[in-house]
Image (cartoon, helix red, strand yellow):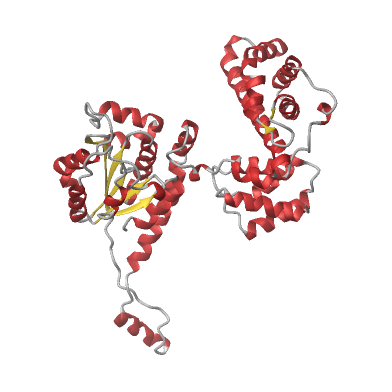
Amino acid sequence: MSLSERLAGFVRALREHGIPAGPGETVDAAAALEVLGLADRERVRAGLAASLLRGQGQRAVFDATFDLYFPLGVGAPERERDTHDDLDALRDRAADALVAGDDTTLAQVAAAAVNGFGRYGSEDAGGWSAHQTLEVVQPQTLLVRVLAAMRADTGRDAFTERLDRDEIRRRIERFREHVRSAARRRAAEVRGREYLARFAVSSTVDQVDFLSADRAQLAELRRAVRPLARKLATRLAARRRRAARGQIDLRRTLRRSLSTGGVPMRPAYRRRRPARPEIVLLCDLSGSVAGFAHFTMLLVQALADEFSRVRVFAFVDSTDEVTRLVAHGAADPAGLGARILAEARVTTWYGHSDYGNALAEFTERYGDAVGPRTSVLILGDARTNGGDPNLAAVRQLADQARRVFWLNPERIALWSTGDSAAHAYAAVVAMHECRNARQLADLVARILPI
């Protein structure tokens, strides 16, 4: 494979994972390779990253894909081809590298660990596992040993122990990343780099499904709320400016054209003053849907300046207003869900999703929150646990509000399967699939009125 083909495949893999690298970025990357050469791999990595990346949260995907298309080497490490460390010797080498903070040696030890302990299955049908390697080597158990060695070498005392422990944990995590990279590289030699790039590299955080996101991914999503809100605010403000221009004022345009010989060079517009909309969020906080609801609450609250009023309501089987809790949630977004469950009345003795009762309670207790200027966003998977979906309450909301949208984090293929009443609700109000942060941002910018 030529270098140009390798670069084209690399860029194609990045695009499949949500990094919008186009022809211009690819040309820049090719120019960077021509200038940098291939002698220094880390310089190549930095040069391609500068050429191809434009947004936050993309570096982890870039690095994992880079390791597949520009590997550190082929096959087993040179030192390991004829000899193999036993486990104790390898852990000794890992500890020495962690004490020294030598990243190059850490990468070599990680490759040796994968070669020695990461193989599974047969030569033809097997592969290489980072998880299996880390389970055998257990680098986390080296912390105390490395801490003692660092103190002995530098004479540091217990006063700096917490800082030293944090630094050692960062080095251990870096070792784990080297192990994962080495395992992907060896697996790519067996299954092909295109296969590994497609199935073994995680997508950017804005493409992670809300329903399958783990704790670390949800934490990263919460960190992405503010940057995403700034981008959305810019898009909404631009839409508002365009809408304010209104239609062409024919009389004023013709009057202006008199100064240019009758040619309407400077059209005049009827100025509009679009009112900022009111937003009401009605959020299901049950089960895995809660992560989607929490992220959307924080996002809309971060956009509060773009709306005249924002009110947030949460429910499981009972409905309560949580606007105040969400407004203060920016200080501790990770604890937002716990605070809502502790301070708001969103559950009763039942404790499972009850859309029928929650919708009825909302229309009865908070019906005055919805008016002709209000856009209502209902967030939930529409799974009623076999109960009454209460379509009448949704029709009442649709009659009262300016617009009602239902954002469903499940795939469309799962709507109305099992206890889902998605299609029944979709016959009353517009329902949209909203599985990740990118879809959510596009929907917010597209469907909310100005």
For the question of whether residue 229 can be seen, the reply is yes
Q: Nearer the viewer, residue 196 or 278?
A: 196
Q: Quadrant of the C terminus?
A: bottom left
Quarter-wise, where is residue 317 in the image? Answer: top left
- The image shows residue 237 at horizontal and vertical percentages of 38, 57
As drawn, the residue found furthest toward the left would be: 364
Counting the numbered discs, the total is 0
Say which residue appears at 36% left-offset and 82% top-offset: 256
Quarter-wise, where is residue 5 in the image? Answer: bottom right
Horizontal arrangement in the rendering, residue 144 relative to residue 354 (left or right): right
For the question of whether residue 171 can be seen, the reply is no
- The image shows residue 395 at horizontal and vertical percentages of 19, 52
Horizontal arrangement in the rendering, residue 31 relative to residue 401 (left or right): right
Quarter-wise, where is residue 69 in the image? Answer: top right
Say which residue appears at 33% left-offset and 51% top-offset: 306
- The image shows residue 251 at horizontal and vertical percentages of 29, 82
- The image shows residue 446 at horizontal and vertical percentages of 38, 57
Say which residue appears at 44% left-offset and 37% top-offset: 222
Q: Can you say whether 246 is above or below 443 in the image?
A: below
Q: Nearer the viewer, residue 237 or 445?
A: 445
Q: Nearer the viewer, residue 113 or 191?
A: 191
As drawn, the residue found furthest toward the bottom would be: 261
Q: Nearer the viewer, residue 276 or 159?
A: 276
Horizontal arrangement in the rendering, residue 261 relative to residue 186 (left or right): left
As drawn, the residue found furthest toward the right would be: 82
